[in-house]
Image (cartoon, rainbow, N blue to C red):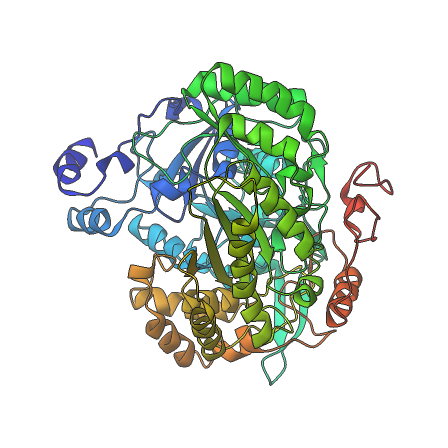
Amino acid sequence: MQQALDRILPHVQKPGRYIGGELNSIVKDANTVDVRFAFCFPDTYEVGMSHLGMKILYSLLNSLDYIWCERVFAPWMDMEEALRRENVPLYALESLDPLGEFDIIGFTLQYELSFTNILNMLDMAGIPVLCEERKGLKNLVVAGGPCACNPEPLADFIDLFMLGEGEDVIVELVSLYRTAKQENWTKEHFLEAANELEGVYVPSLYEVSYYEDGKIRAVTPKNGAKFPIKKRIVQDMSTTFYPKDFVVPFIDTVHDRAIVEVMRGCIRGCRFCQAGFLYRPLREKEPEVLCSQGKSLCETTGYEEISLSSLSTSDYSKIEPMLDDLIDYTVDNHINLSLPSLRIDNFSEELLAKVARVRKSGLTFAPEAGTQRLRDVINKNITEEDIFSSCKIAFEGGYTSVKLYFMLGLPTETMEDCEGIIELAQKIVGFYHRLENRPKGKPVNVTVSVSTFVPKPFTPFQWFGQDTLEQIVKKQKHMLDCITSRKISFKYHASKTSVLEAVFARGDRRLGRVIYKAWQKGCYFDGWDEHFYFDRWEEALKECGLTIEFYANRTREIGEVLPWSHLDYGVTEAFLRKEWEKAQQAATTPNCREQCSGCGANKLLERKGGKCVE
């Protein structure tokens, strides 16, 4: 392998992606471990090395002496071409051993448009992409991550899925595999036993039937398989495993810094936000644990930036004492501190003062919608007064740049709501110039970033049909026409990728054939604009007798069996229905600290019946 790489690497871009040997990477003797686990990220090294979940599970698995977990990333086009030309199989970075030598091949599912990369990586390794063609226990293909909440489009390719949070279930799964390997179980025997683990779903043990119109009739378990399949969660964030060090890449990555996870879950209940529902219930780390973890990572990696990771960092209940301790450390050691995910309605002068000690760049807020009516529909629970209050604090604190995130195509959205996005940005520009205590002699810049709404499983908007491609483009053009100030920057994301994302987010098992055909037509790295071929996907769908409209644009009926109806992510369907009804009326729901709304997620906690949020 090394000789082949010596020939290949001088001729590819960024060879540092493919060589391994980074600081804190873990090398073991393959002859002394019982299970070899390949952690596969179906995107480039730079994207995968930025992912916190991979860092956690890599370190966790390697902390066990009978497991060796190695990293595998999707090689870029030039490297793939060279590997195939030289007949070199895809390999893991730590040992440089071919992927086919591993017992378990695990993929993390972060984004629907990475699905074809999974097939391509397996094919590059010489491993059959279809489950039915992988007969033995070796090369067991598993997957987890947020997109596993609707695993059905990948059911033809993945042997089993881990639902929810992986720290506990992945260890149980590998331990079971160790036993199966030692006792020479069949693959079928292992899958039946694995399916009994809480948080594990084996699609082959469930049969899906359909009506003539393509809707799902039923999902039926075979041979007494459990039903429904419940996700797993970590009970205590302060005591659960967290790495003391990260692998430090040789090249720049998307997020190249120490990351400390503050909490999981979110109190807000924004109706479009899948993560806010998937990661319920809320669980926080204690401040001293956060500070200790941040300091440890800086000392073991040499990073000069700490990022506090959560869905809404400023909602952390003990943010003031935590920042007091952590900022003293970062200032004394010349370390930058990043606080993403700040809420508009609890952004204070005190928080700004703390942030300004270690960071002086633009601030980012997410109003999500341009009118109060639509903000109420999505349960954003912020007002225009909140927005201007936060902007005032920022501008008087010396900031001249504000970035605002919005979503296009939200349920009940009108063209007036789209105009409201630009009107709000223009109001902020005027507001800046009217402030007496603004930074003198410095122009203001308001960046409006608009992404296309994608209806997602396990949200109150899971039944809602996405805007058609024509509607999305029409709204984008209209907003561009509404801009009258050069001090407003307008950015929007490619709408065709969002349409395909919606297809697979709410898709069923029949889409497996579409994924396979699209991959055969050369579709992979679909999340990269320069390698996205929408026409090929349209061809694949047509050849399989399926349509974009059925999956992306069709509004589901309440009561319809959804592809994920047999999976239990804690939040009850009754609660989601109630939130959908309130959205129709533009009625809001208080956040979890103000009032418990009875979503059902607290039942996942060992302290059953208790409150998630004090």
Horizontal side of 506 relative to 378 (left or right) equals: left
Q: Is residue 311 visible?
A: no
Horizontal side, residue 131 vs residue 409: left or right: left
Q: Residue furthest top?
A: 332
Q: Is residue 121 left or right of residue 307?
A: left
Residue 370 in the image: above or below residue 474: above
Q: Where is residue 5 in the image (x, y as percent from the top left)?
A: 18, 36
Q: Nearer the viewer, residue 501 or 86?
A: 501
- Which of these two is toward me, 28 or 559? 559
Q: The N terminus is located in which quarter?
A: top left
The residue lying at 58 percent from left, 46 percent from top is: 391
Does 361 appear above or below 246? below
Report the number of numbered marks.
Answer: 0
Q: Quadrant location of the C terminus?
A: top right
Q: How far from the left and from the top, in percent, is residue 304?
A: 42, 23
Q: Is residue 392 visible?
A: yes
Name which residue lies at 68% across and 36% down. Answer: 234
Choose between 241 and 64: the one closer to the eye.
Answer: 241
Does residue 612 sit above or below 124 in this rendering? Answer: above
Q: In front: 44, or 156?
A: 44
Q: Which residue lies furthest to the bottom in this view?
A: 212
Q: Which residue lies furthest to the right in this view?
A: 609
Q: Where is residue 110 in the image (x, y as percent from the top left)?
A: 49, 50
Residue under the image location 52 percent in, 59 percent down: 425
Query: Percent x, y for residue 320?
Result: 68, 27
Q: Which residue is drawn at 37% across and 55% down?
A: 117
Q: Quadrant of residue 573?
A: bottom right
